[in-house]
Amino acid sequence: MATTTGTGAKKIDNTDDWRDIFDIHNDTVDAYDGKIGTTALPTTAQTITGAIDEHETDISTLNSNLTTVESKNIDGTYCYLYKKSDVIYMFGHSAGGKTLTGDSQWHTLTTVDAGYRPRGDIYFAGASTGGKGISFHLASNGTLEYVTDANTSYWNYSVSFPL
């Protein structure tokens, strides 16, 4: 039989002591709070499932309210444009083989069509291999320019802005 030592601790002498302590013949351990009694897990699982179903409905409603995406590809891979819900998502990269000239001067990369241009000028950073910095400028007239201090063949950029 179990004996008490110290502050209410029980020394377990054999398997029967475990059965006495947890009374596993008559009750189950509550998966929710670890106490002896009925299991609360089915109720908890139903609550979680209901919440998931509710959020999936909310997401479906949000997706149905979005406008259709319009897309445009300018100059091969140098500039991709997507318009969705009056926001332009623009990105480009060097997969088309375009090497950026690194002479610390502004160079025109391409011109963005009307309907995809920002209301005002936007400046943003790009990335390249070797840690070379690239700055981009998208003017309100659609001109996309870059400046870098070293020639680079592997580069990318992305920016988004409201119409």
Image (tube, helix red, strand yellow):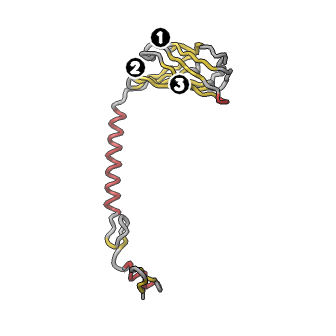
Residue 7's image quarter?
Answer: bottom left
Mark 1: few/some/many CA within 10 Å (<14, 14-19, 20+): some
Label 2, on which residue? 163
Query: Which mark is drawn over residue 91?
Result: 3
Whole-number angstrom distance, CA of label 2 to CA of label 1: 13 Å
Q: Quadrant of residue 106?
A: top right
Distance between the alpha carbons at the discs numbered 1 and 3: 18 Å
Tag 2: Cα neighbours inside 10 Å, few (<14), some, or many (≥20)? some
Q: Are marks 2 and 1 in contact (CB under 8 Å)?
A: no
| Image spot of residue 148 (x, y percent) | 63, 20
- Image quarter of the N terminus: bottom left
Instruction: Name the N-terminal-most of marks 1 and 3.
Output: 3
Q: Callout 1, which amino acid?
A: Asn
* 111 to the left or right of 132: left
Q: Is residue 64 above or below residue 148?
A: below
- Estimate the x, y position of residue 45 in percent, counting from the top left: 35, 58
Element type where label 3 sits in the image: strand
Q: Residue at x 36, y 64 (%)?
A: 32
Task: Choose the circle earlier in sequence order: 2 or 1.
Answer: 1
- Residue 11 is drawn in which quadrant? bottom left
Q: Amino acid at mark 3?
A: Phe
Residue at the disc numbered 1: 141
- Tell which residue pokes out farthest to the top in this image: 141
Pinpoint residue 47: horizontal percent, then vertical percent. Answer: 31, 55
